[in-house]
Image (tube, grey):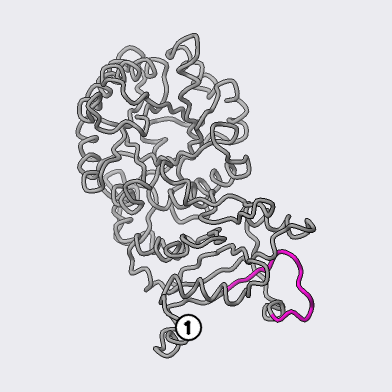
């Protein structure tokens, strides 16, 4: 097993900026954080990592340019990043394109992260998050997953115990994932439906009544909106008790039980307590905003034996995610590539479902970005169980057949406002939603 973990960055250079100096500055900033001569004098060069792959993109330099000759014959894999594709398309666009972009893979020593998720994230995007023009486009997940079977064994059903195995890994992914959730809930061969209880300010009784009507309509997952916390209008314990009871009552009428996911996002020192409380009160899973409570905390929860899947909500994540910047607005891609962040990183950190803003809704993601998120969440090349991508953010029921065809059955479709505003009412709208998914 390698003693390095590999991370790929897309660097946008300013006109005349030295490529080698830009790369070296990144290596120093994310490791020793000392001037290069000092690092050499201390014999600590190894902590700064090594460049293993390099691609230069953008306007061609003159043949005699020293920056170009340094990298003569150097190449690397382009990968599938939409940011890299944007850079490549801009390279031949004529005046006004980026001066130059570099795709560089750095192999960092594993000792740098100390087997702690917080330090891993710090090495990935710590101080450089405060700079500009640095996008993270790929992480070699097998380098940070470790031995998938370490500390594992089999559970009572004879299956590999993913929770036990994950305790000895830096990143272990979801406790359940798509296949285990399908088996747990006996839902096979179709996409899942999800909706949200809202608005903030409603009483627990009114929210429970909504849950009852959604459940009568057969919606698979009824989650709290991420704005529902422990407000006086709907205190956490009271709300969970009432919503669980409402879902149970609806199941007695329909013979099919919906699943209720309360929002457990709170101050970090109380999250684990609230997670366990949700299980005790009969919830079927939980909603969590990992960027509010800390990404490593979600991974910790996924390793506990509560039996509750985790749905990750993207609140507070926007500034971490790179958009394909444009030369005309003098903005460069900076942050995590969205597919890597919402699909790959959330999955690695333990999300069984990862919510993201679908294209055409209230947010600005493109269809290419959404496809990348779905791919990262579900692809078999990662050493973690696949998780359900959950597009939302303004989805309309009359477009559901289109999204189902494009995204496929291993998707959880999150729809809220469209069901609330349907003149036929929530129960009828929910039933129609489920029929579209083949339920």
Residue 79 place in picture, x, y as percent? 63, 59
Q: Residue furthest top?
A: 424
Q: Residue at x 35, y 32 (%)?
A: 227
Q: Can residue 163 be seen here? A: yes
**Quarter-of-image position of residue 22:** bottom right
**On the picture, is 257 further left or further right than 35?**
left
Q: Which residue is mark 1?
A: 36
Residue 57 place in picture, x, y as percent? 70, 65
Q: Secondary structure at mark 1?
A: helix
Whether residue 20 is in magenta: the answer is no
Vertical relation: 372 (above or below) 127: above
Residue 376 place in picture, x, y as percent? 53, 49
Q: Residue at x 50, y 14 (%)?
A: 422
Q: Quadrant of the N terminus?
A: bottom left
Q: Residue at x 55, y 64 (%)?
A: 8
**Quarter-of-image position of residue 257:** top left
Q: Nearer the viewer, residue 240 or 129?
A: 129
**On the picture, is 46 further left or further right than 208?**
right
Residue 207 place in picture, x, y as percent? 31, 20
Q: Residue at x 29, y 52 (%)?
A: 300
Vertical relation: 356 (above or below) 52: above
Around disc 1, counting alpha carbons within 10 Å, would you say few (fewer than 14), some (14 to 19), or many (20 or more)? some
Magenta segment boundaries in residue numbering: 52-66
Whether residue 63 is in magenta: the answer is yes
Q: Can residue 179 be seen here? A: no
């Amino acid at each position: 097993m390698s003693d390095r973990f590999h991370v790929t960055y897309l660097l946008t250079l300013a006109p005349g900026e030295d490529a080698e100096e830009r790369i070296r500055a990144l290596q120093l900033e994310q490791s020793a954080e000392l001037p290069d001569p000092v690092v050499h004098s201390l014999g600590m060069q190894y902590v700064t990592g090594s460049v293993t792959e390099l691609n230069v993109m953008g306007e061609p330099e003159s043949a005699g340019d020293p920056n170009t000759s340094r990298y003569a014959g150097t190449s690397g894999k382009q990968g599938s990043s939409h940011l890299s594709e944007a850079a490549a398309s801009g390279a031949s666009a004529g005046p006004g394109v980026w001066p130059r972009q570099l795709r560089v893979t750095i192999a960092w020593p594993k000792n740098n992260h100390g087997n702690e998720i917080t330090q891993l994230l710090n090495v990935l995007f710590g101080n450089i998050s405060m700079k500009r023009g640095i996008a993270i486009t790929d992480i070699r997940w097998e380098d940070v997953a470790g031995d998938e079977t370490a500390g594992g064994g089999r559970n009572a059903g004879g299956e590999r115990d993913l929770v036990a195995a994950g305790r000895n890994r830096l990143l272990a992914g979801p406790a359940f994932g798509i296949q285990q959730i399908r088996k747990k809930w006996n839902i096979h061969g179709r996409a899942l439906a999800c909706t949200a209880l809202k608005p903030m300010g409603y009483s627990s009784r009114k929210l429970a009544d909504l849950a009852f009507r959604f459940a009568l309509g057969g919606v698979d997952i009824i989650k709290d909106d991420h704005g529902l916390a422990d407000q006086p209008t709907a205190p956490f314990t009271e709300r969970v008790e009432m919503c669980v009871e409402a879902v149970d009552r609806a199941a007695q009428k329909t013979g099919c039980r919906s699943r209720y996911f309360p929002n457990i996002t709170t101050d970090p020192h109380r999250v684990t307590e609230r997670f366990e409380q949700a299980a005790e009160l009969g919830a079927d899973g939980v909603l969590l905003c990992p960027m509010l409570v800390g990404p490593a905390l979600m991974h910790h929860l996924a390793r506990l034996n509560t039996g509750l899947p985790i749905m990750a909500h993207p609140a507070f994540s926007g500034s971490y995610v790179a958009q394909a910047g444009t030369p005309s607005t003098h903005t460069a891609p900076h942050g995590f590539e969205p597919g890597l962040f919402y699909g790959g990183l959330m999955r690695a950190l333990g999300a069984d479902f990862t919510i993201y803003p679908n294209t055409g809704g209230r947010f600005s993601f493109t269809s290419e970005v959404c496809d990348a998120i779905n791919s990262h969440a579900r692809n078999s090349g990662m050493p973690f169980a696949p998780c359900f991508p959950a597009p939302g953010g303004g989805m309309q029921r009359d477009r559901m057949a289109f999204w189902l065809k494009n995204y496929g059955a291993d998707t959880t479709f999150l729809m809220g406002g469209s069901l609330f505003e349907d003149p036929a009412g929530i129960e009828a709208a929910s039933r129609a939603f489920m029929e579209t998914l083949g339920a």
